[in-house]
Amino acid sequence: MKFKDTLAADRDVFFRPDEFGETHNLNGADVPCIVQSPTARERFLGQKYSGYEGISGKVVVVHVKTDDLEEIPREGQVFILDGETMLVDECVDDLGIASITLHQNVGGGVDAY
């Protein structure tokens, strides 16, 4: 078995609810995925929200199998995560796993998206 074949088999295990996966609603579909928020350590080290001056916000990264997405998100696209409107900063597809970085302005009129 080749390395890429091994990764494809392990990908399904990785997203199981009894492993690392959780079901979240992504653009109206319930999908097994992993949602990460920056840790306190990352924020302390300067990897914090880089929105506009005076506007706070949050950033999350969603890891999901590309097969479970209706379409691969693109930068600037509106994305709904568990009912919250967010914007796509970037989406990287690596061996069938999409890592989608999302941001949301807090107090800056999120509903304007």
Image (spheres, grey):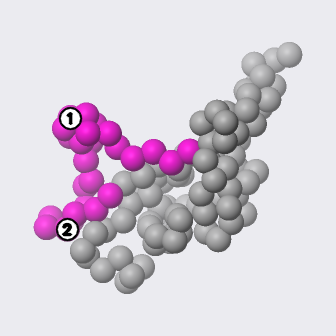
Element assignment for label 1: loop
Quadrant in which residue 111 is drawn:
bottom left
Name the residue at the bottom extreme.
112
Asked whether 5 or 63 is in front, the reply is: 63
On the image, the x and y values in percent for residue 2 come to: 81, 17
Q: Which residues are magenta?
A: 34-58
* Residue drawn at point x = 79 percent, y = 29 percent: 9
Please report whichever mark, 2 or 1, sits nearer to the chain's N-terminal start: 1
The three-letter code of the residue at mark 2 reads Ile
Inter-mark Cα distance, 2 to 1: 20 Å
The three-letter code of the residue at mark 1 reads Leu
Q: Is residue 44 above or below residue 50?
A: above
Quarter of the image with the C terminus is bottom left
Residue 71 shows in this picture: no
* Residue drawn at point x = 61 percent, y = 47 percent: 22
On the image, the x and y values in percent for residue 40 come to: 26, 39
Q: Is residue 87 left or right of residue 91?
A: left
Q: Which residue is mark 1?
A: 45
* Residue drawn at point x = 78 percent, y = 22 percent: 6
Q: Is residue 101 left or right of residue 40?
A: right
Name the residue at the top extreme.
1
Q: Which residue is mark 2?
A: 55
Indicate whether residue 29 is drawn in magenta: no
Element assignment for label 2: loop
Quarter of the image with the N terminus is top right
Q: Is residue 104 above or below residue 66?
A: below
